[in-house]
Amino acid sequence: MNLIIWLIIGGIIGWLASLVMKTDGQQGIILNVVVGIIGSWLGGWLIAPLIGGAGVMAYVSAFLGAIILLAIVNLFRRGRVR
């Protein structure tokens, strides 16, 4: 059951991050889920210790991690962060 919840939350976080970075039209739902899950892991590993990774702040760090991941992907794809 936790895997399904991770996929749903990861998809929502990845979708919101792609809206912020204006890449939503270029990627589908699968890439949104992947970006959300990997970004959440990245945010939990790098950002959560800095801002306190409990409760709502865990979602904030996951969202920031997904945005950072999209910025890195855009940097390699287009040569700019956007």
Image (tube, helix red, strand yellow):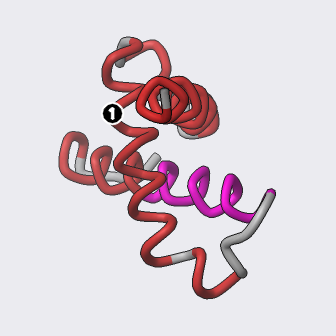
Local secondary structure at mark 1? helix
Residue at image location 60% in from the left, 27% down from the top: 12
Q: Residues within 10 Å of mark 1 (few under 14, many from 20)?
A: some
Q: 39 and 20: which one is in front?
A: 39
The count of marks equals 1
- 49 lies left or right of 43: right
In the displayed image of the protein, which residue is found farthest to the front? 1
Disc 1 marks a residue whose amino acid type is: Val
The magenta-colored residue range is 56-68
Q: Is residue 29 above or below residue 39?
A: above
In the displayed image of the protein, which residue is found farthest to the left? 76
In the displayed image of the protein, which residue is found farthest to the right? 56
Residue at image location 48% in from the left, 49% down from the top: 66
Residue at the disc numbered 1: 34
Whole-percent x, y for residue 5 in the image = 54, 29
Residue at image location 54% in from the left, 39% down from the top: 21
Whole-percent x, y for residue 48 in the image = 59, 75
